[in-house]
Image (cartoon, rainbow, N blue to C red):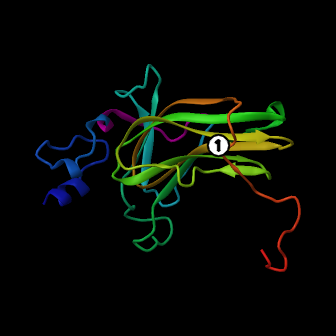
């Protein structure tokens, strides 16, 4: 009964306190201002499994918080819903010209809080044609208090940069204090292309 009541609640509404904690959605979502578009950002959620907006209640050290949460598969998905093993995924990203950042080492960071026991979130950043980092193995999952995540990449001769947030599973995520700045920290990404073909005879 508890599970049915949880699954049937209207998104963004308060749930009765009688529900066990493992099924209770945080009440902060009652003040979520859902938005169709956030200036400068692009929201991609092919199966319409998430909602996102700006919280009126939750702030981090005076900064506004972006809120994203899983709301389940849609009644009428835009195309056939995949197998149950599929992890619903959504992205909030932006793309911009890299000219002013060339020959610099740039850090993309944000403070993140996670409340979804079966969800995860990661930062993602791509320097066009050169390197990328999607926090593989460093993603934030389950229940986690405010924590700063960061990506550091070199920007040599790239023409464009993309960065953003990748949300998966039954996630409830708060993101705040997003910063993009020059850094001297060690890079965290991987090269997209090697300088030349390697190990063509499979000897190594």
Could you tell me which quadrant the C terminus lies in? Answer: bottom right
Helix, strand or loop for disc 1: strand
Q: Residue furthest left?
A: 18
Q: Residue at x 82, y 30 (%)?
A: 100
Q: Quadrant of residue 34?
A: top left
Instruction: Check disc 1 and report the residue beneath it.
Output: 163
Vertical arrangement, residue 43 with respect to residue 28, above or below: below
Name the spot of residue 23 as percent of width and height, x first: 22, 52
Q: Residue at x 39, y 50 (%)?
A: 171
Q: Quadrant of residue 165?
A: top right
| In the foreground, 108 or 162 | 108
Q: Residue 157 vs residue 87: left or right?
A: right
The residue range painted magenta reads 29-39
| In the foreground, 113 or 25 | 113
Q: Residue 18 vs residue 31: left or right?
A: left
Q: Residue at x 68, y 48 (%)?
A: 189
């Amino acid at each position: 009964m508890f599970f049915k009541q949880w699954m049937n609640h209207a998104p963004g509404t308060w749930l009765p306190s009688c529900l066990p904690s493992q099924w209770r959605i945080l009440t902060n979502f009652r003040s979520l201002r859902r938005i169709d578009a956030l200036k400068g950002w692009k929201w991609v959620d092919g199966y319409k499994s998430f909602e996102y907006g700006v919280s009126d209640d939750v702030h981090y050290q005076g900064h506004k918080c972006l809120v994203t949460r899983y709301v389940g598969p849609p009644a009428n998905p835009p195309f056939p819903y995949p197998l149950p093993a599929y992890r619903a995924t959504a992205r909030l990203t932006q793309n911009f010209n890299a000219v002013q950042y060339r020959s610099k080492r740039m850090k993309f960071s944000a403070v993140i809080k996670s409340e979804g026991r079966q969800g995860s979130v990661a930062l993602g950043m791509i320097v066009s044609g050169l390197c990328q980092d999607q926090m593989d193995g460093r993603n934030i999952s389950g229940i986690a208090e405010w924590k700063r995540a960061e990506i550091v990449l070199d920007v040599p001769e790239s023409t464009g940069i993309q960065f953003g947030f990748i949300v998966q599973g039954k996630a409830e995520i708060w993101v705040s204090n997003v910063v993009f700045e020059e850094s001297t920290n060690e890079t965290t990404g991987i090269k997209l292309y090697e300088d030349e073909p390697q190990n063509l005879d499979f000897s190594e």
